[in-house]
Amino acid sequence: MGCCLHRFAHRKRAPLSLKRGVYILKRLSWGLIGGGQGSQIGFAHRSGAEIDGRFKLMAGAMDVDPNVAKSYGASLGLDPSRAYGTWQEMLQGEKSRDDRIDLVTVATPNATHFEISKAFLEAGFHVLCEKPMTMTVPEAQALVQIAKRPTAFAR
Ligand SMILES: NC(=O)c1ccc[n+]([C@@H]2O[C@H](COP(=O)([O-])OP(=O)(O)OC[C@H]3O[C@@H](n4cnc5c(N)ncnc54)[C@H](O)[C@@H]3O)[C@@H](O)[C@H]2O)c1
C-alpha cells in the first residue's frame, strides 16, 4: 500500500455529515497522477477507489505524455477541463477551483514522488503516495513535516 500524507493529521476523525440521525462519510473528490493506460498500478487504484462509493475520480494527469494524459482522462469520463496534461497544470487548475479535489493519489515513477507530493501538500491537498514514498529518508521526513503544518496554505 501507499502512504497517506494528509493536511489535518492532528484531527482524530474524517469529515462527517449528519443526515436523518446517521453519520455519513462525505464522498471524496479524488485526483490521480500517473496510473495511466497501460500502467501496472493505475487500474488497481481506480477500481479500488470506486469500490465502496466513497471516492469519485474528478481530476487527473495520468500519463507522462500530455496529449495522452488529456485524452485518457477524458476517456474515463473526466470533465475535459479536469483531464490535465501535466501534474503542474492539475495543481494550478485544482487550486483555483471552489470544488477542488479533496485528495490526490501519486502513482508515478518513484523519482517523481517527492516533487509532486511536496507541491500538492504545500497547496493544502491530502496526498496518498505510492510506495516508496520518496527516494531518500530526508525527503520522506520533509514530506511528513509539511503534512503536519496546520496552516501551510492559503486556499
Ligand atoms: N506495479 C505494482 O505492482 C506496484 C505495486 C506497488 C507500488 N507500485 C508503485 O506505483 C508507482 C507506479 O508504478 P507502475 O508499476 O504503475 O509504473 P508504470 O511505469 O507501469 O506506470 C507509470 C504511469 O505513470 C505515468 N507517468 C510517468 N511520469 C508521469 C508524470 N510526470 N506525470 C504524470 N504521469 C506520469 C506513466 O505515463 C504511466 O501511466 C511506483 O511508485 C511503484 O513503485 C507499483
Image: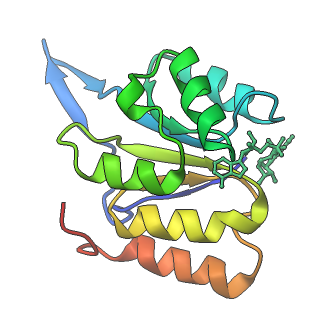
**Residue sitting at the far front:** 67
- Compared with 109, 19 (above or below) is above
Image x and y of residue 141, in percent: 60, 82
Q: Residue at x 70, y 33 (%)?
A: 36
Q: Residue at x 58, y 25 (%)?
A: 71
Image x and y of residue 88, in percent: 47, 57
Between residue 43 and residue 9, name the one nearer to us: 43
Give the quadrant of the C terminus. bottom left
Q: Residue at x 43, y 51 (%)?
A: 89
**Residue sitting at the far top:** 20
Q: Residue at x 61, y 25 (%)?
A: 72
Indicate the quadrant where residue 7 lies.
bottom left
Between residue 34 and residue 43, name the one nearer to us: 34
Indicate the quadrant where residue 101 lies.
top left
Side (left or right) of 67 relative to 36 = left
**Residue sitting at the far bottom:** 138
- Compared with 25, 99 (above or below) is below
- Compared with 6, 85 (above or below) is above
Image x and y of residue 1, in percent: 73, 46
